[in-house]
Image (tube, rainbow, N blue to C red):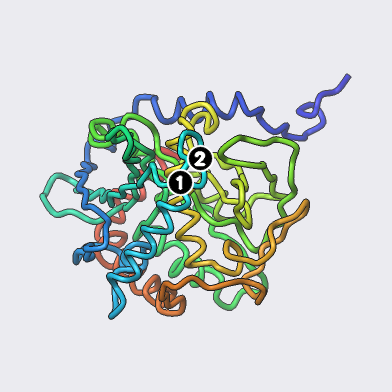
Amino acid sequence: MKTADDAGLRTRPTGLENAINARARFLGSQDTTMTNDLTFTIKSIRFDENYKPSDGTRTTTNFANLARGERRQENLRNALRMIDNRCNDLAHWDNPESDRYAVELDIISAELDIGGNGQTFPAIEVLKTTILDRRTGARIEGIVGNNFSSYVRDYDFSIRLPEHNRDRAGFSVPEDFGELHGKLFQCFVNSKAYKAHFRKPPVICLSVSENKIYRRTANRHPVLGVEYEANEPSLTEQYFHKMGLQVRYFMPPECAAPLAFYFFGDLLNDYTNLELIGTISTMETFQRIYRPEIYNANSVAGQCYKPNLKQNDHSLTRIVYDREERTRLAIEQGRFAEEHFIKPHASLLGRLSAQHAL
């Protein structure tokens, strides 16, 4: 009998195979021939109602976008309250008054020094959650990742991809699209700096794609909720795959739509329920603010779901947000990455992409 491979069809890896392969990518030793030239330094700043973005912060990040304008402090206070309320809603056991937990957020900035010359580039920004148990006083370490921001990602999607498709009859993606960004991210999570600060690999939680269709499955997790599967990989999923990440889609209880969880290893078994709740409450709140058409919709995703950013049956939060400004700033930041990182280090970065190709 011919197998799928014999017939020229590639079988999809099982969940266990994916977990083993992804964990190996996270834990495996790196070829230091090239990565000796890359040194990461990790800095953190508390994200609270008094937060003010530093000069090096990407201005399109969820947290920086909230922290500008006349209503800066009110925006931050309302967002943090929404996160805490959602956390207590999900962590409802032994929590009769729905006020036992609070989520603390730290912005983690990874600055990259190429060649050891002391000049750093703000490569990556993520969030780290900590869950405060008000009843016991315990501070429970949460997940690092959650939100994900990168100047190189801005360059890829806001500069390189549009330039590649200019004057083309149909949309296409450059052959090596995402290779550099993916290898930089893998260098980061395998770096001494990352492993000195964080005990578990990152989980990134994003919106689903409005260009894909998602179908509900029978699989259900007590915290993550019901699982969905996409009809085909999105461009974001392909991009994050080059970062060494796999994806699963879950719609948490009382959420309006599925969230995309990008991770190494085994999402359901590598993290505790409280760790997952910290991520869900944080990122669902940001999505309700930034994509209310999907995550603050007045009806929830059904058996077959296609997100739509043009549908009007949704509610707005009390938080002010300028979507057009965010798009414009992404282009400016892409240009910044091109001028201060991509072009000055083109030779080294090109070798890095080729050497560590998946």
The residue that label 2 is drawn on is 92
**Residue 185 in the figure: left or right of residue 228:** left
Q: Indicate the secondary structure of the residue bearing disc 1.
A: loop
Residue 338 visible at all: no
Hey, what amino acid is under mark 1?
Ser
- Residue for point 24% across, 32% down: 192
**Residue 8 in the figure: left or right of residue 68:** right
Circles 1 and 2, Cβ within 8 Å, touching? The answer is yes
Tell me the CA gap for discs 1 and 2. 7 Å
Image quadrant assignment for residue 68: bottom left
Q: Position of residue 341 (x, y in %)?
A: 27, 59
Image quadrant assignment for residue 155: bottom left
Residue 326 vs 31, above or below: the answer is: below
Q: Earlier in the sequence, mark 1 or mark 2?
A: 2
**Residue 178 in the figure: left or right of residue 72:** right
Q: Position of residue 233 (x, y in %)?
A: 65, 50
Q: Indicate the secondary structure of the residue bearing disc 2.
A: loop
Quarter that holds the N terminus: top right
Q: Residue furthest front?
A: 97
Q: Position of residue 116 (x, y in %)?
A: 14, 44
- Residue for point 69% across, 63% down: 299
The residue that label 1 is drawn on is 98
